[in-house]
Image: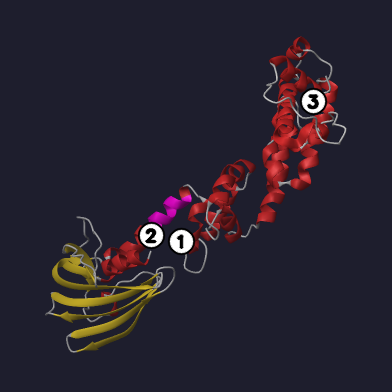
């Protein structure tokens, strides 16, 4: 991210904003054609020279000749004869420092240089830039200066983010260095209304569990907007019960699980009942599945539930939870009877085992 700042700040400081063809001739500023060259110190990177048009102040000795964004502060600006020197400090995630100077070459031209230093994960990065500017006509400094253009571009970006508020973009709106901090309330109101719901939280759960520790998640976005995880779940758990989002309840709402188990329909939510409500699933199996042959089960509305319950019970038995755990008789030593070596259960044996597990 610091490398991005190294590219961005020269663009600001040297006026590298595309101004468009229509420029007002109000006379409040000078429209300069600026040519810049930049290089990374210690790296074999030669960036091509760039020429753009930028609107600067009439007073070439003004501090406004050093445009900067809201996270950067110009200091130690001094004028000596036809030269001006300055320092610049940028805060926030992409912190950096810079020193520069420019020389006035008469009323219609100037040239200068800047040296920038940033810390990139403990590694110092440096960039040098040189620039020359020549006036081509007047311009409207209030609306066409780099600072004004930057604010307009930022406002456009923030408004675009507000059109589709997403937890991923929360750092742009929250925190002391947020670029859209003035619109935090608008963002939070829209984002929370859209994303504090069982469907979104449940769908994003696997992604949150897979990211490295310390990576910002939607829970952090909620917290940045004043809604803790506990508050969010206090809102979404009742919504999940009402919407019958029982898988969400099983994962996030243990206090509501009993209510969900009572409300679940075995003909529609059999997997939830079998996986999360073993006591009720066992009772339903005894009531609707036990003692019924294949023909009777096939005609029953509980056929899917019964088959899934039997399959799940059989899977548990085969996984090692054993006959003793499922009510089957154990050997004389208390252990499960040994299976006959090399003999595979027949289709009829497997069907009988499944029926036994549901009380058939």
Considering only vertical position in the picture, is 104 above or below 233? Answer: below
Q: Earlier in the sequence, mark 3 or mark 1?
A: 1
Q: CA distance from mark 2 to mark 3?
A: 65 Å
Q: Secondary structure at mark 3?
A: helix
Q: Hey, which quadrant is residue 47 in on the image?
A: bottom left
Quarter of the image where one finds residue 350: top right
Whether label 1 touches label 2, CB < 8 Å: yes
Q: Which mark is residue 90?
A: none
Coloring scheme of the render? secondary structure
Residues 339 and 76: in front is: 339
Residue that carries the numbered disc 3 in the rendered image: 357
Give the residue at mark 1. 180
* Tag shown at residue 154: 2
Under circle 1, the secondary element is: loop
Q: Residue at x 45, y 52 (%)?
A: 161
The residue located at (15%, 72%) in the rendering is: 132
What x and y, as percent, mark residue 154? 38, 60
Say if residue 142 shows up in the picture: no
The spot of residue 149 in percent (x, y) is 31, 62
């Amino acid at each position: 991210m610091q490398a991005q700042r190294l590219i961005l700040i020269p663009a600001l400081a040297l006026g590298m904003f595309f101004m468009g063809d229509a420029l007002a001739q109000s006379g409040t500023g000078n429209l300069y054609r600026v040519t810049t060259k930049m290089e990374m110190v210690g790296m074999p990177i030669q960036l091509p020279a760039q020429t753009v048009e930028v609107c600067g102040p009439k007073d070439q000795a003004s501090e406004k000749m050093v445009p900067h964004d809201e996270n950067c502060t110009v200091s130690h600006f001094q004028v000596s004869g036809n030269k001006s020197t300055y320092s610049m400090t940028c805060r926030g995630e992409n912190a950096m420092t810079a020193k520069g100077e420019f020389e006035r070459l008469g009323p219609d031209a100037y040239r200068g240089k800047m040296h920038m230093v940033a810390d990139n994960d403990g590694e110092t990065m440096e960039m040098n830039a040189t620039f020359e500017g020549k006036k081509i006509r007047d311009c409207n400094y209030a609306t066409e200066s780099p600072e004004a253009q930057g604010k307009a571009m930022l406002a456009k970006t923030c408004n675009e983010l507000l059109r589709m508020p997403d937890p991923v973009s929360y750092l742009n709106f929250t925190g002391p260095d947020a670029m859209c901090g003035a619109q935090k309330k608008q963002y939070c109101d829209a984002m929370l209304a859209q994303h504090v719901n069982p469907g979104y939280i449940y769908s994003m759960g696997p992604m949150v569990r897979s990211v490295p520790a310390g990576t910002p998640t939607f829970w952090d976005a909620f917290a940045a907007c004043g809604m803790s995880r506990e508050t969010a779940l206090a809102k979404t758990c009742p919504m999940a019960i009402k919407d019958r989002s029982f898988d969400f309840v099983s994962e996030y709402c243990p206090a509501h699980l009993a209510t969900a188990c009572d409300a679940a329909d075995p003909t529609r939510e059999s997997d939830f009942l079998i996986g999360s409500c073993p006591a009720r699933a066992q009772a339903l199996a005894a009531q609707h599945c036990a003692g019924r042959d294949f023909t009777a089960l096939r005609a029953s509305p509980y056929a899917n539930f019964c088959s899934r319950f039997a399959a799940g019970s059989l899977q548990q038995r085969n996984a090692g939870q054993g006959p003793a755990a499922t009510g089957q008789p154990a050997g004389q030593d208390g252990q499960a009877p040994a299976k006959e070596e090399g003999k595979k259960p027949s289709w009829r044996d497997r069907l009988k085992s499944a029926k036994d597990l549901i009380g058939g």
